[in-house]
Image: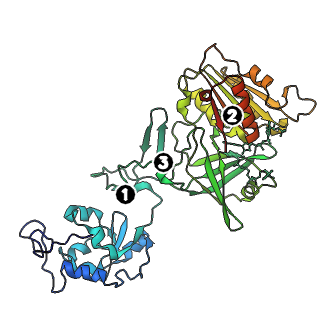
Amino acid sequence: MLNVPSQSFPAPSSQQRVASGGRSKVPLKQGRSLMDWIRLTKSGKDLTGLKGRLIEVTEEELKKHNKKDDCWICIRGFVYNVSPYMEYHPGGEDELMRAAGSDGTDLFDQVHRWVNYESMLKECLVGRMAIKPAVSKGLSHEVEEDISVRVVENVGKIEIVLKKKETTSWKRLGHPLENHNSLIPRKDTGLYYRKCQLISKEGVTHDTKLFCLMLPPSAHLQVPTGQHVYLKLTITGTEIVKPYTPVSDFLLSEFKEPVLLNNKYIYFLIKVYPDGLFTPELDHLQIGDSVSVSNPEGNFKTSQFQELEDLFLLAAGTGFTPMAKILNYALTNIPSLRKVKLMFFNKTEDDIIWRSQLEKLAFKDKRFDVEFVLSAPTSEWNGKRGHISPALLSEFLKRSLDKSKVLICICGPTPFTEQGIRLLHELNFSKDEIHSFTA
Ligand code: FAD
Ligand code: NAP
């Protein structure tokens, strides 16, 4: 609300009065006082010419409205049609016209930052500027679309590197955008979906595929280790959402996650169920089609790895997906780690995801071991058989030292996970030593 003083109007300090010094003010015509402006804004007259509609304004569109009788100005991302306000502007029409059809934020900040322009121009609001596919909106000069983000998870530091588009020296950095310098609690942000593009689809096993999605320009999405996102597709007119756990492409590219996470791609290992609701639809997508991807969720924390000595991973089927990143994280970042063991349950040999990569890793890194257990093997299978059981677990879960710090992660079909947790408790592992990935 505008705070209009009642006794003496215009007040001595009012922008209505022609200033004796400082910024020059022009005498306003009869019937063009602040009060008159307020009356006009409350009259219900369509001041924007858009009949109350708010639109998204592109830079090209903004530029077109640069005449006195058709003058749009952008202030901090919001676009106003200031033509009706021209004659009421204490600084005069010429001053407003300096920002016609452009971003007037800087000019506005230099001249009269204190003015409560939001309420003053509320009825002139045309809409918001369309977000440009570059991050440079608040910056004074353009930057390259490719930005790199380095996240140092264990110290909670994020480093963002922006490259100038032109190698000139910048006099100023720019102006802060909405929500600048504010930390918004995760619970208040809600699920935000970005449209990604299907880039490739490769068979990994007979029914599991590696889907590669490309993020939209300038978007950054880093899914923390052990967390999942939701994929959204519209299936016969209804939006369907299912959770999936991204895998880094490190198992494909020699088990090394790049330190600079400037990658635009996100990979998923997904089993296609022919009679399923979501996965056949996903499988039918063509390269270039879009899929919406949410921000990450999940309660796994890498702080669970602190001082960890033995890490045991129990995975069944696609329950392997969270283990892929966990493996990489643990082997790369936890100096105290002595042993990482994966027990991987599947029906048949053909169902084992990334078998050769896992065997190669076990060969290369002496801290890592993998055991495959099959519930429906062929007669040629020499390895372990059956389902998760006390016998299998007690043999597998051997600490490297008597009292070594242990974490056991378990993921797979819900009954598998539930049974596994029961067995682990029977084997005297405590709640803190078990992390289960459940729906
Ligand atoms: P659905 O329609 O759910 O059907 C799946 C199978 O169950 C089909 O064979 C179907 O016939 C059968 N079925 C459906 N309803 C019933 C019923 N009432 N009774 C008996 N059988 C039934 N999957 C992955 O492949 N990769 C991942 O990275 C991954 N991450 C996940 C992360 C989390 C946190 C969770 C909870 C799940 C994850 N999943 C993952 C599983 C995924 O979310 C889907 O459940 C899976 O893809 C199946 O989806 P769908 O709609 O195609 O199949
Ligand atoms: P699957 O191939 O059907 O089964 C994998 C292995 O688990 C098989 O050996 C199977 O034995 C065994 N198994 C199944 N049910 C069992 C039970 N009740 N007790 C003991 N063993 C059992 O598995 P899938 O189709 O890939 O399914 C993977 C599951 O993991 C999905 O339910 C998915 O939702 C879940 N998942 C969860 C997450 C998460 O983060 N929460 C992430 C990824 C995947 P049989 O031969 O007897 O069937």
Q: Quadrant of the C terminus?
A: top right
Residue 72, can we see it? no
Tell me which label, 3 or 2, sits earlier in the chain.
3
In the displayed structure, 163 sits above or below 133; it is above
Q: Quadrant of residue 40?
A: bottom left
Residue identifier under label 2: 410
Residue 37, can we see it? yes
Residue identifier under label 1: 178
- Say which residue appears at 69% left-offset and 49% top-offset: 211
Marks 1 and 2: CB-CB under 8 Å?
no
- Say which residue appears at 49% left-offset and 35% top-offset: 153
| Residue 310, x across and y down, in percent | 63, 22
| Residue 34, x across and y down, in percent | 20, 77
Mark 2 nearby-residue class (10 Å; few <14, some 14–19, many ≥20): many
Viewer-closest of 372 and 39: 39
In the displayed structure, 90 sits above or below 113; it is below
Viewer-closest of 390 and 260: 390
Residue identifier under label 3: 186
Q: CA distance from mark 3 to mark 1?
A: 17 Å
Q: CA distance from mark 3 to mark 2?
A: 26 Å
Marks 3 and 2: CB-CB under 8 Å?
no
Label 1 is placed on what type of residue? Glu
- SS at badge 2: strand
Mark 1 nearby-residue class (10 Å; few <14, some 14–19, many ≥20): few
Q: Quadrant of residue 29?
A: bottom left
Q: Nearer the viewer, mark 1 or mark 2?
A: 2
